[in-house]
Image: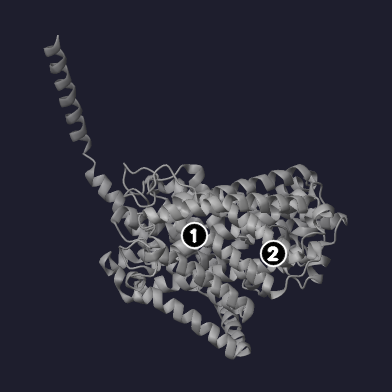
C-alpha cells in the first residue's frame, strides 16, 4: 500500500519534474531543428545532459501520475505478484534481506560479481573461455535450437486452430485485467528492447552485402535484396516470438488455473507439483532465469548507451568518451527504476503505450517518405518467400552462417524468454489461450516483420540507388549496426523529424524492457508469497545499471552477453519439457470438462422437466 509520506514525496517530485521537462524540451527541440541558432550555445556533453533530462523527466512524470484507484497495484484483483508494495523511503532498507529468497537472490549476485572479478583479473582468458564454450555449444547443439524453435511454432499453430485454444485462463468467469490495446502494447514493447530500432535497417543491409550461402544470391544483387528482407523477417518473426509463448503460456496456465506461484520454475508444475516448486531443481531454473535476465538486459543497456552515442558521433561529430556513456546509462537506470517502482498500472503500462504510439508514428512517417514502389514490391516478394521457404529456413543445415545468425538469434530469444514469458503469463489472466497465442506470436510478429520490411526495404533502396553508401558508413564505424539508421534517415525527406523520433525510440524501447525485467527479477528473488517492495525494485534496477557500467568500464560486455545468451540452451530444453507438461494438463482439462458435462439423455430429461415446470408456473399465474 502506498504510504501517505510516499504520496507526498511523489507529488513533490512530480511538481519538480514538469518544469524541468518543459524547459529542457524547449532547448532540445530548438537545438535539434534549429541547430544554427542554439547549437553554438550548448556543448556536446551539454546536449546529452539536456536530452536525458527531457526524455527522463517526461517519462518519469508520466510514470508517477496517480491512477483512479490509488492502490491499483495492491488490490486483490491485480495480477498475482505483479503488485509492488510501495513503502516509504525510510522502510526501503529495513527488512530488505528478510524478504529475499537466499538462493534466487544470492546466487545470481555472486555469479555476476565473480564474472567481473575474473574479467578484471584475467580478461583475455575469461573472454577466450566464454568464446570457446560458445563455439562448441553452437556447433554441436545448433540442432537443439533449430528443432526447439520449429516445434514452438508448430505448437502455437496447434493452439490457434485446435480446441485447447478455447480454454480461458483463470476459469470461465475470469475477466482480463487490461484492455486489449494495453495488453498488446506491454507484451510487444517489453520483449523486444531497442534492438529492433538498430537492427531494423542493419540486418537487411548485412545480408544484402553477404547473403546466406544456401540462398545462391550474389552480393549486392536484386535477389540478395529479397533474401535479405526474407531472413530479417524470419529472425524477428513468428519463430522468435514463439520462444516467449512456450515459456509464458505454461506459467500462465498453472498460475491462473492451479494456483502455482508466478515463477519461471512453474513450468515444472506437472512433474514436481505445486508444493515441489520450492525444491533445488525449481530454484536452479529461477536462478538461471535471473542470470539470463540481468546479463541480457544489462548488456543491452550498456550496448544501447554505446550505440546511441556512436550514432550521435556519426551524425553530428560529437565525441563523449566513457563518461558520456556512463552518464547515459545512469539516466536510463533512473528512468526505468522509477517506472518499475511505480507499478504496472502506472509507469510500465503508460510508457509502453507511449512506446507503441511513437513506434507507429515513426512507421507512418516512413511510409510517407520512403521509396514506396521498391519497398512494397521487394517486401511483398520477401514476404511470399518467407512463407514458402519457412520450413527450409527453420531446419537449415548446420553451417557456420546458420550458427552465426539463426542459432545465435534463437539462443538470444530463448534467453529472454524467462522474463518476457513470465510477464506475458502475468498479464494473460482472463484471456483465452487462443488470444494469448494470437497476441504473443501473430500480432507481435506482424509488427516486427512490418518494421523490418519497411525500414530494411528503405535502407536497401537507398543503398542500391547510391543516395547513401550505408554499408561503407558501417564499415567506417567498425562494423557496428548502431550507425546504420542515421545515413538512411538523413537521405530522406523530413530527416530531422525522423532522426528525433529515432533517438526517442531508442530510449523508450530500452526503458520498456528494462522496467519489466527489473520487476520480474524482483519477483523471482523475493520469497514465495511475498510481493516485491520499493527496496527490491531499486536494488535490482541499480544492479542492472552497475552491471552495465562495469561492462563499459571493465569490459567483458560481449563475454557477458554470450554467457547470458548461452542460458538460452537450458531454456530451449525446458521449453520442450514445459510443452509436454502443458499438453498433459490440457488433455486432463478436456477430460474433466467432458466428465462434468451431463450425458445427452440427462440433458434431454432436464430440458423436458424444466419446460414442464415453466408450463405449470405459467398456468398458475393465469
Residue 308, labelled with which disc?
2
Whether the residues at callouts 2 and 1 have beta carbons within 8 Å, the answer is: no
Mark 1, secondary structure of its residue: helix
Q: Which quarter of the rendering shows the N terminus?
A: bottom left
* Position of residue 21 measured from the top left corner of the image (x, y, whole percent): 62, 52
- The residues tagged by marks 2 and 1 sit, at their Cα atoms, a distance apart of 21 Å
Q: Against 138, is 342 above or below?
A: above
Residue lying furthest top: 622
* Position of residue 308 measured from the top left corner of the image (x, y, whole percent): 69, 64
Point out the tag, 2 or 1, that comes first from the N-terminus. Answer: 2
Q: Residues within 10 Å of mark 2 (few under 14, many from 20)?
A: many
Q: Residue at x 35, y 61 (%)?
A: 531
* Position of residue 565 measured from the top left corner of the image (x, y, whole percent): 55, 72
Q: Which quarter of the rendering shows the C terminus?
A: top left
Residue 516, labelled with which disc?
1
Q: Nearer the viewer, residue 610 or 262?
A: 262
Please state if 270 lies on the left or on the right of 448 as rendered: left
Q: Residues within 10 Å of mark 1 (few under 14, many from 20)?
A: many
Residue lying furthest right: 466
Q: Residue at x 59, y 60 (%)?
A: 510
Mark 2, secondary structure of its residue: helix
Q: Residue at x 64, y 48 (%)?
A: 358
Amino acid at each position: 500500500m502506498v504510504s501517505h509520506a510516499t504520496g507526498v514525496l511523489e507529488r513533490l517530485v512530480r511538481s519538480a519534474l514538469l518544469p524541468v521537462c518543459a524547459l529542457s524540451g524547449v532547448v532540445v527541440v530548438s537545438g535539434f531543428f534549429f541547430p544554427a541558432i542554439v547549437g553554438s550555445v550548448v556543448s556536446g556533453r551539454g546536449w546529452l545532459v539536456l536530452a536525458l533530462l527531457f526524455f527522463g523527466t517526461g517519462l518519469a512524470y508520466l510514470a508517477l501520475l496517480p491512477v483512479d484507484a490509488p492502490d491499483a497495484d495492491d488490490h486483490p484483483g491485480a495480477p498475482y505478484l505483479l503488485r509492488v508494495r510501495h513503502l516509504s523511503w525510510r522502510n526501503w532498507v529495513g527488512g530488505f534481506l528478510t524478504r529475499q529468497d537466499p538462493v534466487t537472490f544470492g546466487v545470481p549476485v555472486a555469479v555476476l560479481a565473480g564474472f567481473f572479478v575474473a574479467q578484471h583479473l584475467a580478461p583475455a582468458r575469461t573472454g577466450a573461455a566464454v568464446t570457446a564454450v560458445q563455439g562448441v555449444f553452437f556447433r554441436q547443439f545448433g540442432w537443439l535450437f533449430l528443432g526447439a524453435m520449429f516445434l514452438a511454432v508448430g505448437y502455437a499453430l496447434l493452439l490457434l486452430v485446435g480446441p485447447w485454444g478455447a480454454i480461458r485462463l483463470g476459469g470461465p468467469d475470469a475477466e482480463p485485467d487490461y484492455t486489449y490495446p494495453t495488453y498488446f502494447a506491454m507484451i510487444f514493447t517489453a520483449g523486444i528492447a531497442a534492438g529492433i530500432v538498430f537492427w531494423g535497417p542493419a540486418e537487411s543491409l548485412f545480408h544484402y552485402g553477404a547473403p546466406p550461402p544456401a540462398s545462391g544470391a550474389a552480393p549486392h544483387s536484386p535477389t540478395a535484396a529479397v533474401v535479405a528482407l526474407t531472413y530479417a523477417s524470419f529472425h524477428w518473426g513468428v519463430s522468435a516470438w514463439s520462444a516467449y509463448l512456450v515459456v509464458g503460456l505454461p506459467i500462465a496456465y498453472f498460475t491462473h488455473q492451479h494456483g502455482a506461484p508466478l515463477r519461471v520454475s512453474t513450468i515444472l508444475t506437472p512433474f514436481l507439483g505445486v508444493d515441489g516448486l520450492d525444491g533445488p531443481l525449481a530454484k536452479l531454473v529461477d536462478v538461471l532465469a535471473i542470470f539470463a535476465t540481468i546479463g541480457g538486459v544489462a548488456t543491452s543497456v550498456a550496448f544501447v548507451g554505446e550505440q546511441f552515442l556512436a550514432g550521435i558521433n556519426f551524425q553530428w561529430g560529437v565525441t563523449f568518451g566513457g563518461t558520456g556513456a556512463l552518464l547515459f546509462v545512469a539516466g536510463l537506470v533512473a528512468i526505468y527504476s522509477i517506472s518499475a517502482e511505480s507499478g504496472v498500472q502506472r509507469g510500465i503500462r503508460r510508457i509502453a503505450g507511449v512506446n507503441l504510439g511513437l513506434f507507429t508514428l515513426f512507421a507512418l512517417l516512413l511510409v510517407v517518405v520512403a521509396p514506396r514502389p521498391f519497398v512494397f514490391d521487394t517486401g511483398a516478394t520477401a514476404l511470399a518467400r518467407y512463407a514458402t521457404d519457412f520450413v527450409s529456413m527453420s531446419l537449415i543445415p548446420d553451417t557456420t552462417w546458420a550458427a552465426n545468425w539463426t542459432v545465435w538469434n534463437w539462443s538470444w530469444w530463448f534467453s529472454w524468454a524467462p522474463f518476457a514469458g513470465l510477464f506475458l503469463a502475468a498479464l494473460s489472466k482472463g484471456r483465452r489461450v487462443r488470444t494469448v497465442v494470437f497476441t504473443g506470436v501473430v500480432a507481435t510478429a506482424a509488427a516486427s516483420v512490418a518494421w523490418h520490411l519497411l525500414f530494411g526495404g528503405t535502407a536497401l533502396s537507398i543503398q542500391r540507388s547510391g543516395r547513401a553508401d550505408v554499408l561503407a558508413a558501417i564499415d567506417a564505424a567498425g562494423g557496428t549496426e548502431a550507425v546504420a539508421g542515421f545515413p538512411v534517415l538523413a537521405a530522406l525527406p523530413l530527416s530531422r523529424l525522423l532522426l528525433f523520433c529515432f533517438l526517442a525510440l531508442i530510449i523508450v524501447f530500452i526503458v520498456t524492457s528494462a522496467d519489466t525485467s527489473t520487476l520480474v527479477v524482483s519477483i523471482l528473488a523475493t520469497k514465495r508469497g511475498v510481493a516485491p517492495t520499493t527496496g527490491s525494485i531499486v536494488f535490482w534496477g541499480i544492479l542492472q545499471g552497475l552491471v552495465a557500467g562495469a561492462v563499459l568500464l571493465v569490459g567483458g560486455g560481449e563475454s557477458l552477453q554470450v554467457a547470458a545468451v548461452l542460458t538460452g540452451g537450458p531454456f530451449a530444453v525446458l521449453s520442450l519439457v514445459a510443452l509436454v507438461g502443458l499438453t498433459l494438463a490440457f488433455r486432463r482439462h478436456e477430460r474433466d470438462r467432458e466428465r462434468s458435462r451431463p450425458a445427452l439423455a440427462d440433458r434431454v430429461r432436464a430440458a423436458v422437466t424444466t419446460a414442464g415446470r415453466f408450463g405449470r408456473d405459467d398456468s398458475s399465474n393465469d
